[in-house]
Each structure stands twice: as structure tokens, then as C-alpha cells.
Image (spheres, grey):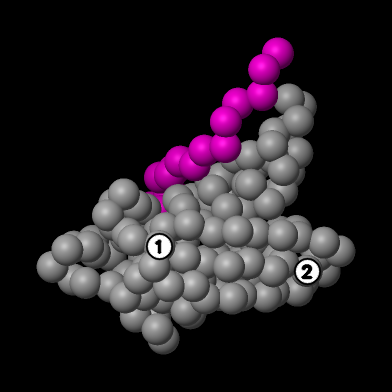
Amino acid sequence: MQPSQPHWEHFEHGADIGVRGYGGSLEEAFTQAALAMTAVVTDLAIIRPVQTVEIQCKEPDSELLLVDWLNALVYEMATRKMIFSRFNVAIEDNVLTATAYGEPIDVERHEPTVEIKGATYTELKVSEQDDGQWCAQCVVDV
């Protein structure tokens, strides 16, 4: 059985939206969850990865780490007025270090559809599946 490629998807959850990332490693799943969150705001294909932002998070388990990671991205998007389309993520001993690549938001070009207020503990789950793929998911408040 061939492993599936890393990917992301959205899932419905009332007025908010769920983000789910899949990958062959925990890092890939977290990367895909971040891409899913950004894709709630705009089309990933139009975001140029021309500036970098370094992010570090530490939590006692992978589920709390996912929420912290996504909320760190929300914070960086809000305070720097940026949007991201690429991520390099490393996780060791529940410490995440990442580089986010993106650009300042251009309302006319990016046409943001919503503003993400934050990642929540709703539907929060990080697990390795039977096929060896990792899944990282939660609901984001929009």
C-alpha cells in the first residue's frame, strides 16, 4: 500500500470551519493544517513566499501544540498584516520551530474572505492513523 501525499481539507462546523492536515509525519500534518487555515482566507496559489517569519511553540502534548501553532500564525498574520503560503516545520520533544513564508496582505489581490480569530479546542485531534499517516485537526473561529 502506497502512502498518500500530504494534503489538507476543510470540514463543516456550524458558523466556524474545521481545518485538517494529513502527512507522513507529524510535521507534515501540522504544515498541511496551517495551509488549510490559510486557504480559509484566500487562494494559496496567489500568495508569494517572499518574506519569512520565525515561530516557536512549546506545549506538553501534540494537540495543544497544534492549537498553539495555528494561533501563533493567526497572531503573526494579524500583527504583521501578512499571509503565508509555505511552512518549514520541525517538532522535537513537543517544541515546534518553524519558518513561515508569505507576504504583506494586499486586499485587492488576495481578496480575503474572512478573518480568522483563532484556533479552538473544538474537534481537536492529532493522531497517527492505521495507515501510518498523521492527521492534525481543529476548528478555527472565523
Counting residues from the start of the chain, the first of labels 2 and 1 encountered is 1
Question: Which label sits on residue 49?
Answer: 1
Picture layout, residue 38 above or below residue 4: below
Left/right placement of residue 23 relative to residue 75 reads right
What residue is at 13 percent from the left and 68 percent from the top? 108
Q: Residue 21: where, in percent of width, then height?
A: 56, 45
Asked if the stretch drawn in magenta spans residue 17, the answer is: yes
Asked whether the viewer can see residue 64, the reply is no
The answer to which quarter of the image holds residue 114 is bottom left
Identify the amino acid type marked 2: Val
Which residue lies under the disc numbered 2?
Answer: 95
The answer to which quarter of the image holds residue 11 is top left
Observer-nearest of 111 and 137: 111
Q: What element carries label 2?
A: strand
Chain part drawn in magenta: 1-18
Question: Which label sits on residue 8?
Answer: none
What residue is at 34 percent from the left and 80 percent from the top? 81
Observer-nearest of 102 and 76: 102
